[in-house]
Image: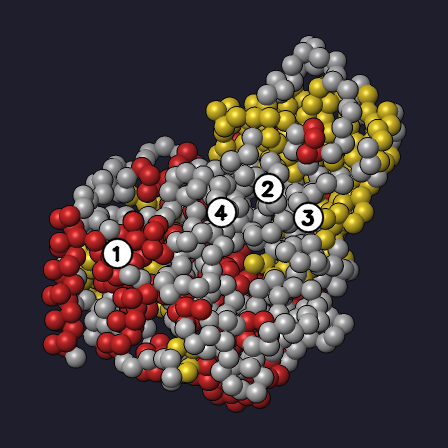
Amino acid sequence: MRWTRRLRLCTAGALAASALFAAPATARATEPNDGRLTDLVNPFIGTENEGNTYPGAAVPFGMVQLSPDTGHNTGYDYSQNHIRGFSLVHLSGVGCGLGGDLPVLPTTGDVTQTDYAKYAAEFSHDDEAASPGYYRVGLKTGIEAELSATARTGVQRYTFPATDKANVLLNAAQSLHSTVSTRVEVLDSRTVRTAVTGRGFCQDTKPYTVYTITRFDRPFTAYGTWDGSTVTSGSKSGRDGAYVRFDTTKDRTVEATTALSYVDAHGAAVNLRAEGGRSFDAVRHQAQQAWEDRLDDVRAKGGDDGLRRTFYSSLYRSFLAPNIGSDADGRYTGWDQKIHRTDGFTYYQNWSLWDTYRTQSQLLSLLAPREARDMAISVIKISEESGWLPKWGYGTVETNIMTGDPVTPFLTNAYQQGLLTGYEERAYRALRENADGTPPADSPAVGREADKEYIAAGFAPYIKGRPHAKPGDSDYDHGASATLEYALSDAMLAQMARQLGHTADADRYAARAQSYRHLFDPSTGFFRARDASGAFTGPVDPAQSEGFHEGTSWQYQWLVPQDLPGMVSLIGGEQAANDRLDSFFAYDRLLADPAKTAREVWVNGPYDYYNADKYNPQNEPDLIAPYTYLSTGEPWKTTDVVHAALTLFTDAPTGMTGNDDLGTMSAWNVLSSIGIFPVQPGYDTWGLSTPVFDRVDLTLDRRYFPRGALTITARGTSTAERYIQSARTDGVAYDRTYLTTGSLRSLRSLDFTVGPRPSEWGTSAQAAPPALK
């Protein structure tokens, strides 16, 4: 085996050298930027070509995301040129309409239109700017709009032309999702209150209500409300919207603060009292400082300006969600639709778990462990209050979007990272109930929908066209991928159970974690779906496979992080696995032209998930795949693939790889750029690859990382010098391709020596991340 690896290393070295001489190296590292890190963030990245990010104002994990809506179903699309309003709620990178509550727009003249698609204001990107916590745009109506935010409020400043008919329209009835009921009230000469009940996200959901109160910095000169298209001047209450008017012939600016609550009108008022009452400039400064403090925990040195901008922009987006759900007085609406009060923690909501369990939750456990602990506690509270753990939760309701069992690795990750002290058994009880059963019929949750069949037969059946019992996605529509994700979750739960002393449970879940084997079809050498009778079903061609959610068998074959040695054995051993990986990544073409391969071979469109035999860096099932080489004796290829995928992140509106999915793709960029990646999501294993920066200094919370800091270096790293020759941890030689969270906590430094050709570093059998037993 050792001689075989040496032969592969020599061959790879020759290929790599020819590629390096054929293509120019990237720009050498510039000196570190001594200015503000927020100046490196471009909030417009991902706002075009279905990245579905938003450019508006928010603070880290804030309840409010005040941002413009242009008519795209998720909010803002850079290719459009009319703004319908600045609304309070947005999620970074979701694929379906969600939020957009209470779009507000400044206008002049008489109010004659109540449909925001008709009164939308034209704008140009030449007169638009955004930075963390701030957004401004010059509308072609002659009005300048500026936005900022606190945790629970959105703050607006409008600069009007000189007129006695300067209006602000508050449109309660139009959102990115459907509205069920709305109402508006003019409380006094400076205050408007609304309640918006809405529903929907990809498919129908139970309704939820957001409450707002908006306080202006000076009295209105006139006001009115509208129901449908009927506008009533002087009316103090209405169903669909309200307008307020100001005289700006002398003082041209109007400021307003809108507070949000998911509890009730009183909660909105509490949040306004707690966080309102400050000038726009003061709020903007505080928001910028909050982001500067957050970004300053990661100090990257080296890399060209474009690389640094894409990196810090990804770091910024990684901290946009989940979002605070509790009011300033600690009250929140639980998933039982009852009001609860926090006790020593902040309640969070918005759970894109099928996405975030693979990258973002681990990044937050590293860089924001106190918030990550509260997030995990919030998920436990959802189970205790509603009767079941969430799958894809928005606000106060379950949407059941996506499949599998993503909540298990989310919570077991929190446990393995030491975030559940005092909650271990409460979390375990909820996870065991979720793993061993399904929610009752009257629960909105679907949980592991195919769990009965999975436990009995070892696989979730693929039943095409099966009626859905509840809104959302169905595991039966994606039985093969659901099986793989159930098995992954069982493996992670087995580790938690064993560490907590639940030995019998641990043995049972560890056995179930091998269920991926039931999908392996020896006649094709790939995973295939099975029907209710147990027969393999769907096309034989693994690139045409059915039963896999947003992917094919080619892509899902690597989603066995709990037992890569077992999976490798199934497909014929290490050499066969590497041959298949090389085909999957188009490795020879990648060496010749990494960026072109990434854009022309891997990427086929933001929602083109099926009928492919190649890596799809735009979608979640493939996020771990490049790190498979760490377990097959060729770790240098992980660096080759990862660095090629990183070229897809650019400093442009199209610079995202598909939907950001609440920071999932952004977190992948951050972790892969600094050289540590969670290769066993739900456990504490961090795979290693070559960083793209000469040095990264991480400031860590001493409560969870006693050393308080970790420095990762790869001096001279570049396109030409990208292969790990050796590694050292606190000065001691280190030959494994992974670290554990425990070892990260004890380290001060992780140092890579890099060179122009692959080496034998990390190629021994003992170097690979271990299988979980």
Quarter containing the C terminus: bottom left
Q: Earlier in the sequence, mark 3 or mark 2?
A: 2
What x and y, as percent, mark residue 494?
49, 80
Image quadrant in which you'd find residue 102: top right
Residue at mark 1 to residue at mark 4: CA–CA distance: 24 Å
The residue at which mark 4 appears reads as 51
Helix, strand or loop under label 2: loop
Q: Residue at x 51, y 79 (%)?
A: 537
Instruction: Mark 4 vs mark 2: give the one in front.
Output: 2
Residue at mark 3 to residue at mark 1: CA–CA distance: 41 Å
Mark 2 surroundings: few (<14), some (14-19) or many (≥20) residues within 10 A = some
Is 430 situated above or below 522?
above
Instruction: Mark 1 vs mark 4: give the one in front.
Output: 1
Q: Earlier in the sequence, mark 3 or mark 4?
A: 4
The residue at which mark 2 appears reads as 72
The residue at which mark 3 appears reads as 177
Q: Earlier in the sequence, mark 3 or mark 1?
A: 3
Q: Is the image coloured rainbow, by chain, by secondary structure, or in one colour?
A: secondary structure
Q: Amino acid at mark 2?
A: His
The residue at which mark 1 appears reads as 590
Name the foreground residue: 552 vs 437: 552
- Marks 3 and 1 close (CB-CB < 8 Å): no
Q: Residue at x 15, y 69 (%)?
A: 8
What x and y, as percent, mark residue 262?
72, 50
Is 676 situated above or below 85?
below
Task: Locate residue 605 relative to residue 585 in the image: left or right.
Answer: right
Residue at mark 4 to residue at mark 2: CA–CA distance: 12 Å
Q: Amino acid at mark 1?
A: Leu
Image quadrant in which you'd find residue 686: bottom left
